[in-house]
């Protein structure tokens, strides 16, 4: 018995679908971007597809499908991650000057 239709059903422009199709065909694309592009292409063809079924077809967890569905419906299409919280990592060679290492 099928459940209710997903609450978030993003729509994609032709240009966004072309971008997703190009990402899927790239040989050296980040795997997460390829997965998101494949998800966008599947949802463009079947917008009412359930999240668990889309996850099974693409080999990702259904919560991942829900997350990207909601993000695309609320904020528009993007395959990039949001910036992580917290202080960015920094490297300063001057901070390592005091370290002499262990001498034998």
Image: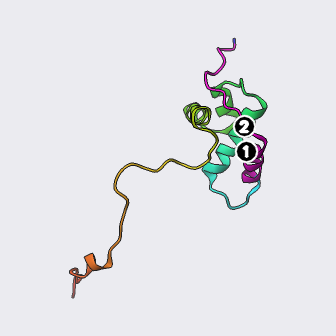
Q: Nearer the viewer, residue 61 or 41?
A: 41
Q: Residues within 10 Å of mark 1 (few under 14, many from 20)?
A: some
Give the percent coordinates (x, y) of residue 79: 62, 47
In the picture shown, does residue 82 fall above or below 73?
below
Q: How far separated are the C-alphas under marks 2 and 1?
A: 6 Å
Kindly indicate whether the residue at mark 1 contacts the one at mark 2 (C-beta within 8 angstroms). yes
**First to last magenta residue range:** 2-24
In the picture shown, does residue 63 fall above or below 33?
above
Query: Which residue is rendered at x = 37% and y = 62% of the image?
Result: 89
Q: Is residue 3 magenta?
A: yes
- Residue 39, which numbered label? none
Most extreme residue toward the top is 1
Q: Is residue 9 magenta?
A: yes
Query: Which residue is rendered at x = 66% and y = 27% of the image?
Result: 9
- Residue 12, which numbered label? 2
Most extreme residue toward the bottom is 104
The secondary element bearing badge 2 is classed as loop
Q: Residues within 10 Å of mark 2 (few under 14, many from 20)?
A: some
Q: Which corner quadrant holds the C terminus?
A: bottom left
Q: How are the residues colored?
A: rainbow
Q: Which residue is mark 1?
A: 16
Give the percent coordinates (x, y) of residue 22: 76, 53
Give the percent coordinates (x, y) of residue 26: 74, 58
Q: Nearer the viewer, residue 3 or 57?
A: 3
Quadrant of the rendered image containing residue 52: top right
Give the percent coordinates (x, y) of residue 4: 65, 14
The secondary element bearing badge 1 is classed as helix
């Amino acid at each position: 018995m099928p459940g209710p239709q997903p609450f978030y059903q993003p729509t994609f422009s032709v240009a966004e679908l072309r971008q997703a199709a190009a990402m899927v065909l790239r040989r050296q694309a980040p795997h997460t971007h390829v997965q998101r592009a494949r998800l966008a292409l599947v949802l463009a063809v079947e917008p009412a597809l359930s999240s668990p079924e889309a996850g099974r077809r693409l080999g990702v967890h259904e919560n991942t499908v829900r997350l990207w569905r909601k993000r695309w419906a609320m904020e528009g299409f993007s395959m990039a991650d949001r910036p992580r919280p917290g202080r960015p990592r920094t490297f300063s060679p001057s901070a390592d000057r005091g370290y002499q290492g262990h001498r034998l």
